[in-house]
Amino acid sequence: MRGNKLQQVRTGAALAVALLVGGLVAACTPPSEPIVTFPAASGPSAVTDAPNELRGPLRVRGRDLVDTDGRVVQLRGTNAVQKSAPFLYSVTDGKLAGLPVDELVRRGYNAVRLGVWPAALMPTPGGVDSAYLEQVAQTVADLEAAGIWVLLDLHQDVFWGMPSWATPADAVNLSEAPAPGFEVIGWAAGYTSAKSLRQWDAFWNNEPVAPGLGMVDAYGVGVQALADRMKDAANVVGIELLNEPFPGTPYVSCVAGGCLELDGLVTARSTELTNAVRAVAPTMPVWWEAQSLATMYALPQMNVDGVTPGPNGPAVGLSFHAYCHETDGGRVEPVPPGTIVWCDSNFRRAFDNAGALAAGWDAPRFLTEFGASGNPYNATVPGRLADEQLVSWLHWSIGTYADEVEVHLQRTYPQATAGTPEYLRFDPATGRTTFRYTPDHSLTSPTVLALAARAYPNGYTATVTGGQVTSAADSGRLTVEADAGASTVTVTVERK
């Protein structure tokens, strides 16, 4: 879901209080986020193209994703969700959604969240469109050839994208008008309509859609078929069960502070779907999303206790999103101090709640959407928090924003760490990067950092303590090997 998010719904009183507090804080020490862009290039880029390394499949190891060499992998990339026929992006003439795939690599990206349309995948209850499934497989294979990891995202927005059979007969003619007072949040207000609430209540309650087949059961047939077809694709980092599921009738209480009963239902349905995957793909990661009013307002009470473990345990991770209504859909302009205070708290709460939930599962978290805005601020803060907390991310859109936004996305980061990542900081204004990790001397593959060409138009210098650079000068992929006996390796990158 992009643009104005229902995740940002809150009462007028709460908003007024927050903005008042933000204004008071700003009056004392006005916060600001300077607008920056890429340095000017004086000629051809000095940073040479270098491929991503795909040593997959990736597997969940505690709170990390690791490759087949045992290195901790960070994913950075973009969404590619096609919401009109054929309901799937293909790699055509070397391009994905109009952007050359090799340009994604040049920008430092190594991952794509590929939208899979449930209505196209499972057009009948318990039935699967094998031709559509093969198209998904072809796109995944083309992205693998380009060195791109793929998260398969079963995508819906306001139940659009869900199969027609998932709408109960008594909901077909219900009103799609938002609940009074919610129109201000835009198209996503449709989630509060009578029709939407009935659809989501039916889904969570697994109401029958065919003899002996509940709604979630039928949905699980499609999820399982997708997992079975893609289980041998080395670049698939897992299946995201459902994009931004909505609470249904309890949505107000979910915003107000939590909805324990619904969390239990979401847990049960997610567990059922995960076990359907486990039956055919025992090691494939499965990514859950909490009901879409979390994690920005309440800490969901969910667990993975009922998941059938594979060889490496539950192999479940948490997908979460971070948006702020006030800067969604904006343009390149300074953000008022009060808005910075408010949005900063939203973003931090999303990261912190997602972190707490994933930690309870001993599982990784993955920021799979953010930044659907022309205002740089919506990329600035999530990008910074992801570095600080070493969280993988996928921006909402491919190459559609101004350089003032892109400069916050084309960040230097470790794609694969031969050890334990400890610290990452990147300054978009200067390109200065500091990365620190504890090496695992049992691993033989190097640590690999991605550097975007535009961030270093005249090249870069890299200094390492506790290790050695093993890549060519100004390579788009900086490789580092730890010195024997080193307990810490620190990599510093500077623009020339």
Image (cartoon, rainbow, N blue to C red):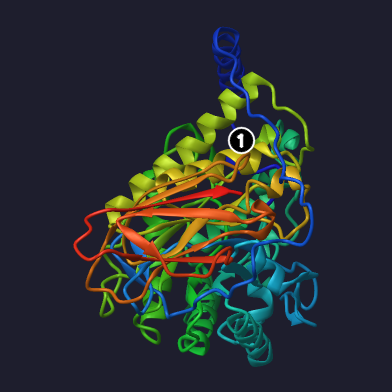
Image height of 390 relative to 298, above or below: below
Image height of 124 relative to 466, above or below: below
Q: Nearer the viewer, residue 219 or 496?
A: 496
359 with respect to 213 (left or right): left
Question: Label 1 amino acid?
Answer: Val
Asked where in the image residue 276 lies, by quadrant, the reply is bottom left
Residue 441 image point, x, y percent: 23, 69
Residue 490 image point, x, y percent: 36, 51
Q: Nearer the viewer, residue 471 or 13?
A: 471
Q: Residues within 10 Å of mark 1 (few under 14, many from 20)?
A: some
Question: Does the rendering let one see residue 244?
Answer: yes
Query: What residue did someone put label 1 on?
Result: 9
Question: Does the rendering let one see residue 373?
Answer: no
Residue in the image at 63% along x and 39% along y: 429
467 with respect to 387 (left or right): left
Residue 128 image point, x, y percent: 60, 87
Image height of 236 relative to 10, above or below: below
